[in-house]
Structures are given as structure tokens and as C-alpha cells.
Image (tube, rainbow, N blue to C red):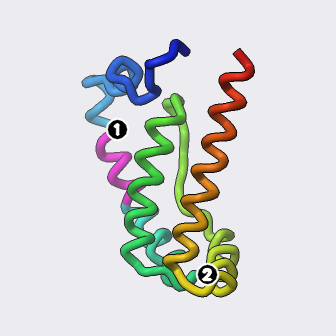
């Protein structure tokens, strides 16, 4: 990939969003959203996080994975096995806000390492 180009560029996204497929893709994406919504809310409730966090996590996660995967056949969604991990982490760290900061910090660190490693492999 050339420097300056993003995976979210208009050309990348445009090749996957075709008008002829939109008639089938839109209803199927709504069904996937409706199936994932109770799972996101249930995981948030079971892990002690606010319900709104589960909703936002589901929406953002779906958009990010669909945009970044580059695959026409990717499936993503909440994993119930993470409930125990999130619940334990929130309990150990002392609150949801601290857990959120720790999660974002880990994401930034792993993203930075991935970018640095990608640049070194050219």
C-alpha cells in the first residue's frame, strides 16, 4: 500500500458497495445488527459495564471490522466468552472508567507496534 492512502479511502470502500448488491446487503446487515444488539447489551450488563457502552461497542466494532477487513465475507460480533474477562478486569481495576482507559491504552500500544512493524517489513 502506498503511503498516504488509507484503507478507508473512497476507492477501497467503493469497490465493495455496489448498487446491485445493496438490495440484498442492506436487509442482511439489519438482521445481523438485530441479532448482535441483545448480545452486546447482555455482555455489557453481565460484565458490569453501562448498557450504552455495549450498544456503542457493537456499532463501532461492526463498522470498524467491516471497513478494515477488506473482505466481502467477514463476520464479526460480540463474544460471550469475553464477559468473564471484562467482569474480572473491571473488578480488579476498580471501575468501568479505568477499564476503558486501560483498554484504549492497550489498543493504542498494539496499533503503534503493528504500524512500526509494518514499516520495518517494507
Please state the horizontal and vertical placement of residue 91, each as a whole percent of the image.
64, 87
The main secondary structure of the magenta stretch is: helix
Residue count near mark 1 (Cα–Cα under 10 Å), binned few <14, some 14–19, many ≥20: some
**Residue 33 vertical position relative to residue 48 in the rendered view, above or below:** above
The quarter of the image holding the C terminus is top right
The segment highlighted magenta reads 26-33
Residue 102 versus residue 28: which sits nearer the camera? 102
Residue 77 versus residue 97: which sits nearer the camera? 97
Please state the horizontal and vertical placement of residue 58, each as a whole percent of the image.
44, 60
Is residue 31 magenta-colored? yes
Please state if 26 lies on the left or on the right of 117 as rendered: left
Please state the horizontal and vertical placement of residue 96, each as a whole percent of the image.
52, 80
Q: Which residue is mark 1?
A: 25
Please state the horizontal and vertical placement of residue 15, each as a whole percent of the image.
38, 19
Residue count near mark 2 (Cα–Cα under 10 Å), binned few <14, some 14–19, many ≥20: some
What residue is drawn where x is 32% and y is 37%?
24
What residue is drawn where x is 37% and y is 47%?
29
What residue is drawn where x is 45% and y is 45%?
64
| Label placed on residue 90 | 2
Q: Earlier in the sequence, mark 1 or mark 2?
A: 1
Amino acid at each position: 500500500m502506498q503511503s498516504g492512502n488509507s484503507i478507508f479511502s473512497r476507492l477501497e470502500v467503493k469497490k465493495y458497495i455496489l448498487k446491485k448488491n445493496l438490495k440484498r446487503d442492506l436487509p442482511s446487515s439489519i438482521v445481523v445488527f438485530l441479532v448482535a444488539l441483545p448480545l452486546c447489551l447482555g455482555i455489557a450488563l453481565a460484565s458490569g459495564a453501562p448498557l450504552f457502552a455495549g450498544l456503542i461497542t457493537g456499532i463501532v466494532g461492526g463498522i470498524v471490522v467491516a471497513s478494515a477487513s477488506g473482505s466481502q465475507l467477514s463476520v464479526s460480533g460480540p463474544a460471550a466468552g469475553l464477559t468473564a474477562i471484562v467482569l474480572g478486569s473491571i473488578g480488579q481495576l476498580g471501575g468501568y472508567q479505568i477499564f476503558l482507559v486501560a483498554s484504549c491504552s492497550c489498543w493504542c500500544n498494539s496499533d503503534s507496534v503493528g504500524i512500526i512493524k509494518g514499516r520495518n517489513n517494507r
